[in-house]
């Protein structure tokens, strides 16, 4: 086991704050801040995850109306000690090439593509934190035998909790945050069955 470099040690006893992420240029690209602790994506990304995130981004960008932007792997500054990195987000904030994070008030939809490494955070921790921050819509995309299944949630404002709005297989039609129509089967190709040797 190697020692932690000094630059990766918290700058204060309370841990890391959201603004500290912008001062960590040598941190891995996919570094999140959850409850004041850095979370690194260290396991290799599966091709299914990357392909699905890319095709979903393109499909949403194609359907998004004027004034709506789709971003991939950008942090959301939920509060001083939480700055997660969703796989995709849909925002009303205008494009800014120098932006490093989004405010929850500008985010309409967050999408997490679940991987084995992130499953617990995506299904429980982020679900709760995004709702508490007031983000209106959350999608959790699961791998079900190499086919995407989308669990859709909408914010119940009085309780600041997400309510399930449907589980989608094959196709997804949603009127919010804008008119969305997706053929889920086209987002990730089925796994090719390789011949046995």
Image: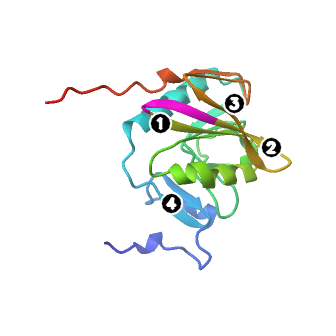
Q: Which residue is mark 4?
A: 39
Up-down: is 131 above or below 152?
below
Q: Which residue is mark 1?
A: 143
Question: Callout 3 environment at 10 Å: few (<14), some (14 to 19), or many (20+)?
Answer: many
Q: How is the image coloured?
A: rainbow
Q: CA distance from mark 2 to mark 3?
A: 22 Å
Question: CB of mark 1 within 8 Å of CB of mark 4?
Answer: no
Going by the image, does 48 lie left or right of 13?
left
Look at the image and give the residue range highlighted in magenta. 145-151
At x 44%, y 27%, the residue is 188
Q: CA distance from mark 3 to mark 1?
A: 27 Å
Q: Which residue is mark 3?
A: 68
In the rendered structure, does residue 150 fall within the stretch colored magenta?
A: yes
Give the number of the disc on residue 156: 2
Q: CA distance from mark 4 to mark 2?
A: 28 Å
Which of the 4 quarters of the picture holds residue 63? top right
Please report whichever mark, 4 or 2, sits nearer to the chain's N-terminal start. Answer: 4
Please report whichever mark, 2 or 3, sits nearer to the chain's N-terminal start. Answer: 3
Going by the image, does 176 lie left or right of 116?
right
């Amino acid at each position: 086991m190697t020692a932690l470099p000094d630059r990766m040690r918290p700058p204060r006893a309370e841990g890391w704050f959201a603004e500290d992420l912008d001062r960590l240029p040598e941190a891995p690209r996919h570094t999140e801040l959850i409850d004041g602790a850095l979370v690194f994506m260290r396991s290799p990304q599966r091709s299914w995850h990357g392909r699905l995130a890319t095709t979903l981004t393109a499909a949403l960008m194609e359907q998004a109306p004027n004034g709506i932007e789709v971003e991939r792997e950008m942090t959301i500054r939920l509060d001083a000690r939480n700055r997660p990195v969703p796989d995709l987000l849909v925002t009303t904030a205008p494009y800014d090439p120098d932006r490093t994070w989004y405010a929850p008030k500008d985010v309409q939809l967050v999408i997490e593509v679940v991987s084995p490494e992130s499953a617990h955070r995506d299904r429980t921790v982020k679900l709760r934190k995004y709702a508490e921050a007031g983000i209106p819509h959350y999608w959790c995309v699961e791998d079900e035998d190499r086919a995407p299944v989308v669990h859709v949630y909408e914010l119940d404002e009085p309780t600041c909790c997400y309510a399930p709005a449907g589980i989608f297989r094959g196709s997804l039609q949603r009127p919010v945050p804008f008119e969305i129509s997706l053929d889920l089967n086209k987002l990730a190709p089925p796994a090719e069955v390789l011949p046995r040797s």
